[in-house]
Image (spheres, rainbow, N blue to C red):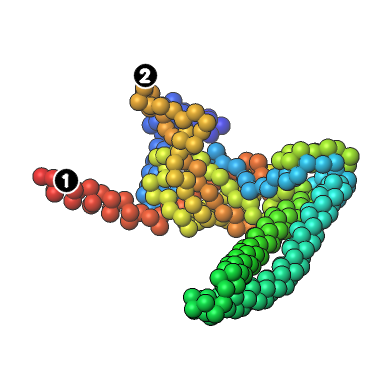
Amino acid sequence: MATDLSESQGQSAPNQGQDRLPPLKRPGVRRGLLAAGVLVVVAGGLWLFQYQMYGQFEQDTNDAYIQADAVTISPKISGYVEQVLVNDNQDVKAGQALVRIDARDYDAQAQQYQAQIDVAKANADNVRAMIGEQEAAIAQARAQLASAEQDARFAAGEAARYAPLAASGAETAERLSSLRNQAAKARATADAQRAVLLSAERKITSLNAQIRQADAQGKAARAQLAAAHVNVGSTVLKSSVAGRIGDRSVRAGQFVQAGTRLMSVVPLSKLYVTANFKETQIGLMRPGQPATIEVDALNGTKIAGHVESISPGTGAQFSLLPPQNATGNFTKIVQRVPVRIAIDAGPEARRVLVPGLSVVVSVDTISAKGAQRSIASQEEARRDAKQ
């Protein structure tokens, strides 16, 4: 009994000595800390390797939103809305009728211009008939002129034959004087007929001018009729793209002015993302680089995309009041550049994607890593050239 007691005391003595050691001097704690340190170093090395090889080329931002080039539906003409042919949030096809405006006023205008065309045509036909009559009058005047000239030549010949006879005393001077008077009258008659012919011919020119005037009036009326037909066609508003109706504010019976916004058509098949990256992130960003889009509405589901284009200026440059950094005190602020990201998603994902949704975009710029060295080498070459 005494022996067992002494042995148990002898065995517990070393254990009690170890329990009294500080935690950092215990072998088990040291081994655990050493293992943890090795793991931390290995993990840090792996992270550093991954960052140097890939991570530093991943550029991401949460300042990104889904957008679409929505088409605003506005009438070209004013009038009362006769019928609204679509409902809110309805899917429509390109060319589908959306709104019909009362077309009676514009139909009446078209009929009025058609009447003006008919009047101009009738005037032209009337003048052409007058030209036909005038041509007949010209032919008559030419015949009368020919007859008058023949009479004038005959009278002049008679006077010329009687002149020697009167000089020799064979004929009286009164006879010669009478013949000369008749010759002068015949010549005057011929001159009058020549003036009548000239007047008739000039009237043809005037009538042709009237035809051209009537034709011009007809062309003007036809142009007005074409514009009236355009207005008649504009009474039916059609969708220029396929998409979904949104923000519909028009109602049947409403009077709308030209240019009034009635609704919008959102082309959901042509959605894209506008990601506003910091200026320090776009140095290696190029069109065509792959992108990952994390959609908040899909519980962070990631879909594929690619860089489509990069804005030619920062967002501040296209604002209503761009900053004038050359005036007053200056505080440097990191600018953001809009980058357009194309969405490479299937139809199932597109069912819930709508403009305005928030997303997180990450772009892999590793394909342009060589550009950094190229830029640096060009800068060095320029410095050497200056020296």
Q: Residue at x 75, y 69 (%)?
A: 133
Image coords of residue 270 (percent x, y):
64, 55
Image coords of residue 24 (percent x, y):
40, 31
Please name the residue that numbered disc 2 is placed on.
Answer: 328
Q: Is residue 63 left or right of residue 372?
A: right
At numbered mark 1, what does the secondary structure look like: helix, strand or loop? helix
Q: Amino acid at mark 2?
A: Gly
Tag of residue 252: none
Mark 2: give few (<14), some (14-19) or many (20+) Cα within 10 Å. few
Q: Amino acid at mark 1?
A: Arg
Q: 385 or 146, which lies in front?
A: 146
**Which quadrant of the figure has residue 220?**
bottom right
Evaluate whether residue 228 shows in this view.
yes
Q: Residue at x 18, y 51 (%)?
A: 381
Image coords of residue 349 (percent x, y):
69, 54
Q: Is residue 290 left or right of residue 151?
A: left
Please name the residue that numbered disc 1 is placed on.
Answer: 383
Q: Are marks 1 and 2 in contact (CB under 8 Å)?
A: no
Number of residue marks: 2
At numbered mark 2, what does the secondary structure look like: helix, strand or loop? loop
Q: Residue at x 38, y 31 (%)?
A: 25
Gap between marks 1 and 2 measured at Cα: 33 Å
Q: Quadrant of the C terminus?
A: top left
Evaluate whether residue 47 shows in this view.
no
